[in-house]
Image (cartoon, helix red, strand yellow):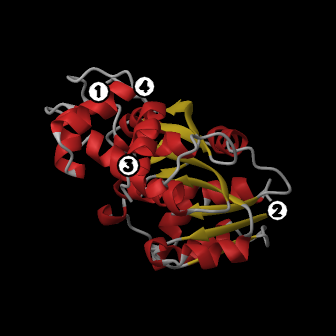
Amino acid sequence: MEDIRTLLQANGFTFKKKYGQNFLTDANLLRAIVSDAGVDGETTVLEIGPGAGTLTRALAGRAKRVVAYEIDERLRPVLRQTLAEFPNAEVRFLDFAGVDLPALERELGRYVVVANLPYYITTPLVMRFVEEAALCDGVTVMVQEEVAERFCAEAGTPEYGAVTAAIARRGRASVTRRVPRTLFYPRPNVDSAVVRIDLSGGGIPVKSEKVYRDTVRCAFLNRRKTLENNLMQTFRLSREEAAELLSALDVGEKARGETLTPQQLARLSDLLFVRGVR
């Protein structure tokens, strides 16, 4: 395949800032991402934002099937050339935000997500799979480095937040590699990292996913307030009731939400559920 810069120029393609387009160009890195995701000849891959198709090619060379969603119609001739050798790769020119995920899962069966995500959609897109997907075994994505730190953060650190706790309930997130900005075209202003989120096993069982989500939102509602106060505000508990819950967790009354591990938040959500919170 010809150089990606040459291919884009030959098709008169110009970058649009609103799409957050920064394409990967390093062949070794592309192969490494495919390996990080655990893709093999039995894997169906869902890719969001294929761009010029460099990662799509690497995925199609290893996977059983690749279905990619691209919002920018102007990339149609570029992707046609990039993927000409790969009949197992299909590009759908649609905004993935509007796709019916349950219907797509019925079509795909079990699958993994692999993508170099535009930074502006990273967190909401990852959260969609974490909270809504039923047949997704894992999500391996290139994200802004600081976002990667939030996905994998430990309780009590500045990076730890609601998204960390949400991911931890479903599976385990880990940074597989750091990626300097020099490996993208055009070059972004920040460095990136590849994060793999395993969703096929593990995670934290809870009595109610909804109550867990509400508990997490409560915990991080106001970092300046104690968790006791946030519980009173969110669930309309008395101070005595909130203190009783924290005591059951062996957590001090002055504790703040961001100091609780995902496991403690799960236990708190179960206690709230037993109390009748739905």
Q: Nearer the viewer, mark 3 or mark 2?
A: 3
Amino acid under disc 4? Glu
Neighbours of disc 4 within 10 Å: few (<14), some (14-19), many (20+): some
Q: Dot 2 lies on which element?
A: loop
Q: Secondary structure at mark 3?
A: loop
Q: Report the residue marked by disc 2.
A: 64
Q: Earlier in the sequence, mark 3 or mark 2?
A: 2
Lower position in the chain sequence, tag 2 or tag 4: 2
Image x and y of residue 67, in percent? 66, 69
Q: CA distance from mark 2 to mark 1?
A: 40 Å
The circle drawn on residue 154 is: 4
Q: Are marks 2 and 1 in contact (CB under 8 Å)?
A: no
The kind of residue on which mark 1 rests is: Pro
Q: Is residue 221 left or right of residue 84?
A: left
Position of residue 138 relative to residue 149, above or below, is: below
Q: CA distance from mark 2 to mark 4?
A: 36 Å
**Closer to the N terminus: mark 3 or mark 4?**
4
Amino acid at circle 2: Lys
- Dot 2 or dot 1: first in sequence order is 2
Disc number for residue 275: 3
Viewer-proximal residue among 87 and 95:
95
- Disc 3, disc 4: CB below 8 Å? no
Residue that badge 1 annotates? 158
Residue 54 drawn at (x, y percent): 62, 56
Q: Depth check: 43 or 271 in front?
A: 271
Pointer 1 with pointer 3, Cβ within 8 A = no
Q: CA distance from mark 3 to mark 4?
A: 29 Å
x, y percent for residue 153: 42, 29
